[in-house]
C-alpha cells in the first residue's frame, strides 16, 4: 500500500472554504473521494463541495439494502409462520397446517422489520459510519470551524496544497501521512 499525504485546512466561514475547494481540486486533479469537508453542522449536498461520485453511488444503490432485506424478511416470515405448522404437524379438523391469515400477518411484519433494518444499515454504510480508521481531525471543527481535508500522493503536492489553502483564507493548516 502506497503512502499518501493529507492536508487539513481550517476555515471560519462557508464562503472562504467554498472558494478554496474547486481551485485545489482542479490544480491537483483530485478525485471526488480524495477531498472532504469536515464540519460540525450539516450543510446541504453541493453547498461546499459537489461530490458527483458519491451522489451517483447513493442515488443508484441506496435502495438495494432495504429492498434485499425486505426479501429476507419475507422469507423469514413465511418460514417462521408457515413452517411452524408443518414442523409441529398439528392437523385440526382436517385443515391444512399452513394457514394464510396468520402467515400473511407475520410475513408482513417481518418484511417491514427487515426493510427498516436495511434502511438503517444503508444509512450507516453511505454515511461512512462507523469509521474505525484514524483520520485527520482538529478539535476546532467541533467548535464551528470548517475543515477541508485533501488526500495527495507526494510531499510536493502536500506543500503546494497547504500554500493554496493559506492563500484562500485558511487560518490553520495541518499536514499528515496516511490519515485520511
Image (spheres, rainbow, N blue to C red):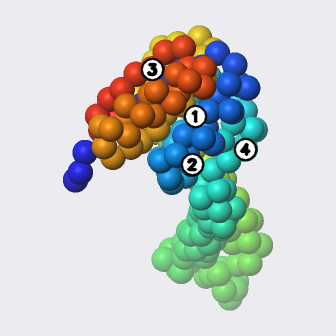
Q: Is residue 113 above or below residue 81?
A: above
Residue 105 pos. (x, y %)? 74, 65
Q: Residue at x 60, y 55 (%)?
A: 54
Q: Are marks 2 and 3 in contact (CB under 8 Å)?
A: no
Task: Estimate the x, y position of residue 31 in percent, counting from the top left.
Answer: 51, 54
Q: Nearer the viewer, residue 59 or 17?
A: 17
- Disc 1 packing (10 Å; few <14; some 14–19; many ≥20): some
| Closer to viewer: mark 2 or mark 4 | 2
The residue at which mark 1 appears reads as 37
Q: Which residue is mark 3?
A: 173
Of pointers 1 and 2, the one earlier in the residue sequence: 2
The answer, for residue 123, to whether it is visible in the render is yes
Q: CA distance from mark 1 to mark 2?
A: 16 Å
Dot 3 alpha-carbon crowd within 10 angstroms: few under 14, some 14 to 19, many 20 or more: some
Q: Nearer the viewer, residue 100 or 120?
A: 120
Query: Which circle, 3 or 1, is nearer the viewer?
Result: 3
Q: For the residue labelled by badge 2, is the local secondary structure a helix, a strand or a loop?
A: helix
Whole-angstrom CA distance, mark 1 to mark 4, is 11 Å
**Do the residues under discs 2 and 4 have CB atoms within 8 angstroms?**
no
Q: Along the polypeptide, which appears first: circle 3 or circle 4?
A: 4
Quadrant in the picture for residue 11 = top right
Please state which of the two labelled residues, at mark 1 or mark 2, is closer to the viewer: 2
Residue 80 in picture, x, y percent from top left: 56, 68
Asked whether disc 3 touches disc 1, contact meaning CB atoms under 8 Å apart, the reply is no
Which residue carries the number 2 mark? 26
Task: Report whether 177 appears left or right of 58.
Answer: left
Q: Which residue is mark 4?
A: 46
Front one among 165 and 102: 165
Query: Total label count?
Result: 4
Q: Residue at x 46, y 27 (%)?
A: 163
- The CA span between labels 3 and 1 is 14 Å
Task: Classify 43 as above or below 23.
Answer: above
Amino acid at each position: 500500500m502506497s503512502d499518501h499525504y493529507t492536508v487539513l485546512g481550517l476555515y471560519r466561514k462557508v464562503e472562504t472554504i467554498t472558494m478554496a475547494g474547486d481551485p485545489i481540486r482542479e490544480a491537483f486533479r483530485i478525485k471526488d473521494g480524495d477531498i472532504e469537508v469536515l464540519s460540525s453542522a450539516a450543510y446541504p449536498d453541493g453547498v461546499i463541495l459537489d461530490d458527483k461520485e458519491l451522489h451517483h453511488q447513493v442515488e443508484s444503490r441506496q435502495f438495494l439494502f432495504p429492498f434485499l432485506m425486505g426479501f429476507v424478511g419475507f422469507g423469514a416470515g413465511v418460514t417462521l409462520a408457515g413452517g411452524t405448522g408443518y414442523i409441529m404437524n398439528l392437523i385440526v379438523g382436517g385443515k391444512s397446517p399452513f394457514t394464510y391469515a396468520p402467515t400473511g400477518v407475520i410475513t408482513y411484519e417481518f418484511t417491514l422489520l427487515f426493510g427498516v433494518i436495511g434502511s438503517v444499515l444503508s444509512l450507516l454504510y453511505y454515511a461512512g459510519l462507523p469509521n474505525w480508521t484514524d483520520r485527520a481531525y482538529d478539535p476546532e471543527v467541533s467548535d464551528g470551524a470548517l475543515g477541508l481535508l485533501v488526500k495527495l500522493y507526494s510531499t510536493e503536492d502536500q506543500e503546494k496544497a497547504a500554500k493554496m489553502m493559506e492563500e484562500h483564507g485558511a487560518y490553520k493548516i495541518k499536514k499528515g501521512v496516511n490519515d485520511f
